[in-house]
Structure formats: C-alpha cells, structure tokens
Amino acid sequence: MSSPSNFNHGLLLIGALMVFFYLIISRGGSSNSNESYTQANISIAIATTILHPSPTFLAWLDYHLRWVQHVVIYMDDANERSEFVRLCGDRPITLFEGSQVAPEMTPESRLIRRQMENMKHAIAYLTEGGYTWLIHIDPDELLYGPLIESRAWAQDPEVGLVTFPNHEALPVSFETSDPFRDNTYFWVSGMDGNANFLAYGNGKSAVRLGRGVKPRGAHWFDGYVGRASTTSPGEAVLLHYPYPSYGSWLRKFNHYGAFPDHWFGDRAAPKIMDFMLQSRDVAQEAHRTGDWAKAKAFFSGRIPDPESRDRAISQGKIRLYTPFSSLESIENHS
C-alpha cells in the first residue's frame, strides 16, 4: 500500500505533466492562431488615376487582382465611366470621378497634382473600409516577384512603408499593343546610377493605412506608423513600361505638349529627367517642321542593338522578365 507521501508526490508529478503539456499545446495553438489572424487581417488595395483605359487595362487589373482585394480607379475623364463600367464587370473595383484640380497646369504637372488629391481620398476611403495597405501604381506598372503574391512584404507589424525598386522596360523597335508580353528586357534599378533609364528610377511604395497617412508626391507616403523598408529586386520589384514603342512615346508627348522646364510652374522644382525634356523638344520640332523621321530616329537611338543588349545582360545591367508566362502556363494546363 502506498504511503500518503508517495501518493502526494504522484499527484504533484501528474499535475506538473498536465501543466507542461497544456503549455505546449496552448503555445502551439496561440502561434498558429496569431499567424492565421495576421494573414486573415491583411487586406491590400491598389489605387490609380486613369485618363483612358488602354488595351492592357484588363490584363493589368486581372494580374494584380490575384493578390489584392480591391482596386480603386479615379477617372480623370468622367465621360469614360460607361467604358470603365463595361470593362470592369463584376470585379472588385470602385470607380470614382477623379480630382479636377489644377486645370491651368500642363498635363504632366496636372497629373501629379490630381494623383495626390486622389490618394488623399483613397486613404480616407480605404481606412474607413478597414483595409490594411494601400499601393499607388499606374496602369503601365506591374508588381512582380515571390514576395508579391505571397504578400510576405506586408506581414511585419513593425513596418509602415514598403518601397519596391523599379526596373524599366526597354522599348521595342516595332509597334505593340501588348507591352506586358512584348517588352521583356529591363534596365536594372541602381546600375550606373540609373543612367539608362528614360523615366523615374526611385521606385513606388505601399503604406500601412492609419490616421495621419498622407501622400508625398506620386511615389511615397508620410505620416505612417512603423519603420520603412525596401524590398530587394529578387524578392519584389516594380516593372515599369513607360515607353514601350515609338508610337506610345509619341502619343505621350503629343498629349504633354510644350510643357515648361519646371514642375507645377515652380522654378524651385526643375524637371531633372533629360529624356523627358529632350522628347518634348523633339516632338515640338517635328510638329513645326513635319520631320517625323528625325523624331523616330531620336527614339530609336534609345533602343540598344542586340550586341549592346547582350553585353549589358552579361554585366547585370539588363534582365529578362516575363510576368505573364507563369499565368499562361497555368491557364494552358487548366
């Protein structure tokens, strides 16, 4: 027969084991629960300002709607609403008439002013709707990389701003209405100080929504809580298609017209992208003289020949990206 002392020791041992296993189970359950909670409570929206829907508009929408929950579109021309409604169908899209501020400005400056006003509205609208993150990108930009679709970039609760570096698509020598598939070579961000870029090279950002958040230009945000981080290009990158072909370049600078050397008419804000200013001058000269061959030669001079391109690839300055190839493979096998 066991003594009371042995019996009590046995009870203590059983009790200790029960507490030990409870802690293991509860810790495991708590970790999984928190992870599920974090995943379930991350909601991402894209906001963008569009004048006219391009031939790649639906491809751009469906590409990003694989991992974002909502897209907010600000129509710069309210007369396009019926076309946007027809194209968007039952996708999770909200259409707003965009800001009409700065009508006196030239188009390239007016666009940035309106984008900022539209982002202020998007921040308030999406915060009220309970969204976690906002990304401001344009219809000629694709977010790409393993961290994008997994949404891993959005998981760290200590991060309030994530910047995605941008690579820039090389133009092609033929006309294309499908640059997302035809323009597959990209100048790599950060190489040679982005000297080969024709447009911006400072990336675009996503912001964790909250009180106090506001846009800082078209690329960043202020007023967020947490630290800022930048993804590595191998993890997540913004693919930018600013001038896919001669035709797209010409249409853009015909639209921009004879704009000034400074943003917003402010001499303290000079335009520092040489290609933009040169393009304005070349397009305006062609309008005056009718010498469009000279304009095309100017643009064609920005397309590397195959030998130069291959050399730049070997130096790590150009990379090949085919963001739609994996999707097409899935579709072909479905």
Image (tube, rainbow, N blue to C red):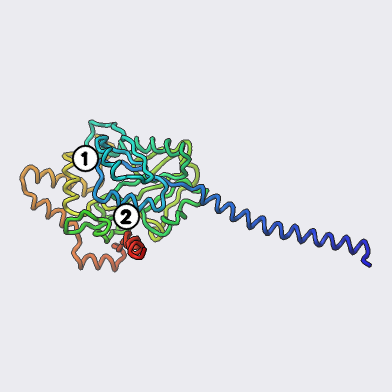
Q: Is residue 62 left or right of residue 19?
A: left
Q: Quadrant of residue 9?
A: bottom right
Q: Quadrant of residue 187?
A: bottom left
Name the amino acid type tagged 1: Asp
Other-residue count near label 1 (Cα within 10 Å), few / some / many at <14 / 14–19 / ≥20 = some
Q: Is disc 2 placed on a helix, strand or loop?
A: strand
Q: Nearer the viewer, mark 2 or mark 1?
A: 2
Question: Residue 277's spot in the image, x, y percent?
Answer: 19, 45
Residue at (47% x, 51% y) in the render: 154
**Along the line of sight, which residue is nearer the eye, 134 or 283?**
134
- Inter-mark Cα distance, 2 to 1: 27 Å
Q: Is residue 27 left or right of residue 220?
A: right
Residue 239 image label: 2
Kindly tell me whether residue 263 is visible in this rendering: no
Q: Work out whether 38 lies above or below 11.
A: above
Residue at (26% x, 59% y) in the render: 181
Residue 261 image label: 1
Q: Earlier in the sequence, mark 2 or mark 1?
A: 2
Kindly tell me whether residue 212 is visible in this rendering: yes
Q: Work out whether 57 lies above or below 302.
A: above
Question: Residue 150's spot in the image, x, y percent?
Answer: 45, 56
Question: Residue 239's spot in the image, x, y percent?
Answer: 32, 55
Q: How many marks?
A: 2
Q: Is residue 45 left or right of residue 285?
A: right
Question: Residue 112's spot in the image, x, y percent?
Answer: 30, 39
